[in-house]
Every structure is written in structure tokens, then in C-alpha cells.
Amino acid sequence: MDAEVAESMFVKAIEEKNVQAILDEMRRDEDEHVQQWGCDALFRVVQHNPPAAKEVLASGGIEAVANAMGRYPQSSEVAHEGSVALWRVMREAGHKAAKAVMTFGGFDALRLVTESHAEGTAPNEAAMLALAMLADNGFIKFGNEEKQMEAYQQAAHKGKVFAQIYVVPEQE
């Protein structure tokens, strides 16, 4: 498929919020530009229709984006569009999406972006944003692990937390 035709197909898929058409094209045509447009199209569909994040998950979209990012690690466009697509899906679909990113290659793809693109570049910043979503969902931690353990050990732990709750009827 020539580039102009592929781009117009993605524009149509965005307008129709057709996640499956986007993923089908990404799987059919491994061209770098098709992968970039596919990642961007997934981002836009989920941006304008947040429930579509669940369809991206159910249709293997996380794996498709991760594969695109892994196939073109030096492409700043694929790295950026893929990272923001993963971020958007995690933002809208929450913990389940973050788990899918960890399971289906998204974490490795994001790590590859941070290693392949200089700090402060758009791809690196987008990957860090997506990695922050993984941290927010408890899958990864940032920082020096030794310092984190030391701070935890130095913190005062006084015992278990408890609360007493009284349920009373509403008074009129």
C-alpha cells in the first residue's frame, strides 16, 4: 500500500473510531511510517473515545505498539508515537492496561526508547511519561533501590493501623 493511501486509511479509521482497522493495517504492513501512523491513530481514537482503550487491550493493541517500537528502535517518530499511545491507553484503562504493558512487551519497548534516545528528547520524555504510569500502578519504581530500602528501614514503624467505625441511623 502506498504511503498516501495508508495515511488516508488511518484518517478514516480515526474518524470512525475503528481500532480493529488500525491494528489490522499495523499487522499487515510493517513499514516504519505505517507503524508510526498506526500508533498515532490508536492514541487519537482513545483520546477522543476513552472506552476504546478497552478495545485496544482486547484486540492485542499493546503488543502491536510494542512490536512497532521494537522493530524501529532508532526511529524517533515511532518511539514517540508508540510511547504516547501506551500512555494514553494506560491512562484510560488503568491497572489492567498497565499490566498488559508489562506482559506484552510494552515495558521492554519503553526501556529501549529511554536507552536509544537522549534524555530531554520527545521520545525519551514520552517514554518516561508512560513509565510513570507503570510506577503509579505499582509495577516499577524509579530511583536508587539501595536508598529506597535504607529510607524504609529508617522509618519509624509503630504497629498496625486500625480504625473504629460506628454506623448509626441518620437522624431527622
Image (cartoon, grey):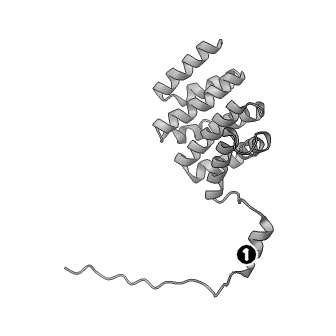
Residue 63 seen in this snapshot: no
Q: Is residue 23 left or right of residue 16?
A: right
Q: Is residue 4 left or right of residue 153?
A: left
Image coordinates of residue 126 in percent, x first then y, are 64, 43
Please, is residue 66 above or below residue 93 in the view?
above
Q: Residue at x 71, y 59 (%)?
A: 142
Q: Quadrant of the N terminus?
A: top right
Please, is residue 85 above or below residue 93 in the view?
above
Q: Residue at x 71, y 47 (%)?
A: 103
Q: Which residue is mark 1?
A: 151
Image coordinates of residue 76 in percent, x first then y, are 71, 33
Image coordinates of residue 38 in percent, x first then y, are 62, 28
Image coordinates of residue 57 in percent, x first then y, are 59, 41
Q: Residue at x 77, y 42 (%)?
A: 112
SS at circle 1: helix
Residue 98 seen in this snapshot: yes
Q: Quadrant of the C terminus?
A: bottom left
Q: Residue at x 70, y 37 (%)?
A: 66
Q: Amino acid at mark 1?
A: Ala
